[in-house]
Image: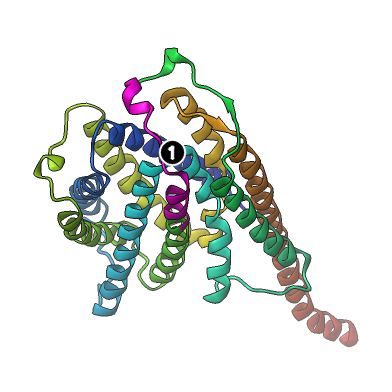
């Protein structure tokens, strides 16, 4: 069953990710390039992870790294790079609240990919499997509502908490484009979970895997950013919220969260990690309205409620499935013992 420590760790990570979305949005409103942000964040995380690897593996060496594993990590880095690009460009076009709402799709996409890769079993005769399928469909419907239907404004941020200039807050975000990019990032996150889980099973060194992955992400994102960002001034970090956002992303999100994700994926699999994504919408709404001056719309509330219902349906089905598996394994073990008992009773 699920450990309370693992659940607490996943909730902390979701809080850190929402904080990153809020900080990155604030930094982008100050003029920071989202492409440059991805490069600097990953580049700063590399020496941090290197130091951690040297400490952790000073006595116990990691497993040997084969060419096949290295190629798979390169592909994993490409998926991570694409995910970050789509995510932060989508946040620039929309808001952290929409980003958190769209990441609620991650459990649905992860479940489907896990079925395709045979990490999850599909048996429609079982109630747990039906619940997971229904929850997946409901989550997708909720995400479509959040993206397509914005609705009337139902809450405004208090002027006492606004931290950005009025001219920056008054910019109109392209909701549909942002939602589309964030939906692509949700698919990429789900694919990242599944691919990373498959690699960890063959190369069980979470810290080393995260370190090598971020080296590849830094290289790949640098190439993309040099092509997409031609303005040399965009590569200059200002000593304000931009620098804070990069440091926060590198230390708390990419280094800490990346390693923690790899460890939890090794322990519980991709579906368990993805199931905590919908928690972020509540945190994002509070942070976005309070600190960014975002306006809360009816469509976001309705869609988030539908997504949350779908999420908890999937979670209930997953929990029930684990109980059924434990019951089945218990029955099987007892059935193996029955012949021995019968033999002893016959001899008596």
- Extreme residue in the top direction: 160
- Extreme residue in the left direction: 232
In the rendering, at what x and y percent does residue 146 appear?
A: 57, 45
The boundaries of the magenta stretch are: 165-183
Q: Residue at x 78, y 73 (%)?
A: 125
Give the left or right position of residue 24, taking residue 192 as reference: left
From where the camera sits, is residue 16 visible?
yes
- Above or below for 12 versus 268: above
Identify the residue under disc 1. 95
- Looking at the picture, tell me which residue is in the foreground, 99 or 214: 99
In the rendering, at what x and y percent does residue 273 appear?
A: 51, 54
Q: Quadrant of the C terminus?
A: bottom right
Give the left or right position of residue 251, taking residue 103 as reference: left
- Above or below for 15 versus 200: above
Q: Residue at x 47, y 42 (%)?
A: 14
- Looking at the picture, tell me which residue is in the foreground, 331 or 219: 219
- Looking at the picture, tell me which residue is in the foreground, 171 or 228: 171
Give the left or right position of residue 130, taking residue 51 as reference: right
| Residue 178 among magenta residues | yes
In the rendering, at what x and y percent does residue 281 appear?
A: 54, 39
């Amino acid at each position: 069953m699920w450990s309370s420590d693992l659940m607490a760790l996943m909730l902390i990570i979701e809080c850190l990710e929402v904080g990153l979305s809020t900080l990155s949005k604030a930094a982008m409103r100050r003029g920071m390039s989202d492409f440059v942000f991805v490069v600097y964040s990953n580049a700063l995380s590399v020496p941090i992870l290197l130091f951690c690897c040297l400490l952790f593996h000073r006595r116990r060496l990691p497993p040997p790294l084969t060419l096949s594993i290295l190629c798979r990590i390169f592909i994993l880095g490409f998926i991570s790079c694409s995910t970050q690009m789509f995510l932060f460009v989508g946040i620039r076009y929309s808001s952290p609240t929409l980003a958190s709402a769209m990441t609620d799709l991650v459990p649905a996409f992860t479940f489907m990919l896990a079925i395709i890769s045979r990490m999850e079993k599909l048996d429609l005769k079982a109630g747990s499997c039906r619940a997971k399928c229904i929850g997946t469909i409901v989550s997708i419907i909720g995400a479509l509502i959040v993206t397509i239907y914005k609705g009337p404004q139902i809450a405004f941020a208090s002027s006492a908490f606004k931290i950005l200039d009025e001219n920056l807050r008054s910019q109109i975000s392209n909701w549909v484009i942002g939602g589309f990019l964030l939906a692509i990032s949700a698919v990429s996150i789900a694919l990242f979970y599944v691919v990373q889980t498959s690699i960890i099973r063959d190369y069980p060194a979470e810290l080393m895997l995260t370190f090598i992955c971020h080296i590849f992400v830094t290289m790949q994102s640098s190439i993309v950013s040099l092509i997409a960002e031609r303005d040399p001034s965009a590569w200059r970090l200002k000593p304000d919220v931009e620098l804070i956002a990069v440091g926060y992303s590198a230390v708390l999100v990419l280094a800490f969260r990346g390693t923690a994700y790899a460890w939890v994926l090794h322990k519980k699999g991709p579906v368990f990690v993805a199931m905590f994504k919908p928690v972020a919408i509540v945190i994002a709404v509070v942070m976005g309205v309070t600190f960014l001056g975002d306006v809360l719309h009816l469509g976001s509330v309705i869609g988030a409620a539908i997504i949350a219902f779908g999420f908890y349906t999937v979670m209930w089905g997953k929990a029930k499935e684990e109980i059924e598996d434990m019951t089945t394994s218990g029955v099987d073990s007892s059935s193996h013992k029955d012949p021995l008992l019968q033999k002893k009773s016959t001899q008596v």
